[in-house]
Image (cartoon, rainbow, N blue to C red):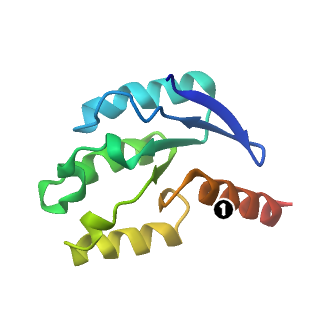
Amino acid sequence: MADTLEHIADTPVLICAPDGPPLRDEHDVTDLIGEGYQHGVAWVVVPADRLADDFFRLRTRVAGGMIQKFVNYRLGLAVVGDISRHTDASTALQDLVRESNRGTQLWFLPHIDALRTRLAAGSRERK
């Protein structure tokens, strides 16, 4: 399956295929950011299963490097899928998820429909 471009509530979103290559570090996300820019997207959706376990171990700083890339390029990042095995093991990750989900740049969501709901709500607020 290939990555797809979808407009959700008038927001262009790049949805990464679940069977794509694993994302292990900030260099791996550079191609996604380039693809996102090529299509003029505002958000990139990455299935949680494509992220290496080190992403969820905050002490490795992998998440920080990857997230910073998206921030630098002003692209939203939505990590979609069940990450409970990681959050159950780390209060620091629980805090990151909670704080990120309050913001507008990085969201951890259980499924793509949750992203649709959030983007639709943001679209109504802007009108």
Q: Is residue 125 left or right of residue 81?
A: right
> What residue sits 44% from the left and 42% below the top?
46
For disc 1, the neighbor class at 10 Å (few under 14, some 14 to 19, many from 20) is some
Q: Hey, which quadrant is residue 95 in on the image?
A: bottom left
Total tally of numbered discs in the picture = 1
Q: Hey, which quadrant is residue 38 in on the image?
A: top right
Circle 1 sits on which residue? 118
Residue 81 percent coordinates (x, y): 44, 54
Q: Give the answer, above or below, for where 30 lies relative to 48.
A: above
Which quarter of the rendered picture does the C terminus lie within?
Answer: bottom right
- The amino acid beneath tag 1 is Arg
Q: Give the farthest residue toward the left.
A: 60
Q: Give the answer, above or below, for where 98 lies relative to 61.
A: below
> What residue sits 31% from the left and 27% below the top?
21
Q: Hey, which quadrant is residue 120 in on the image?
A: bottom right
> What residue sits 30% from the left and 44% below the top?
51
The residue lying toward the viewer, choosing from 81 and 98, is 81
Residue 100 percent coordinates (x, y): 44, 66
> What residue sits 59% from the left and 28% below the top?
4
Task: Name the element at disc 1.
Answer: helix
Q: Give the answer, above or below, for where 29 lies relative to 65.
A: above
Residue 11 percent coordinates (x, y): 71, 43
Residue 119 percent coordinates (x, y): 68, 56
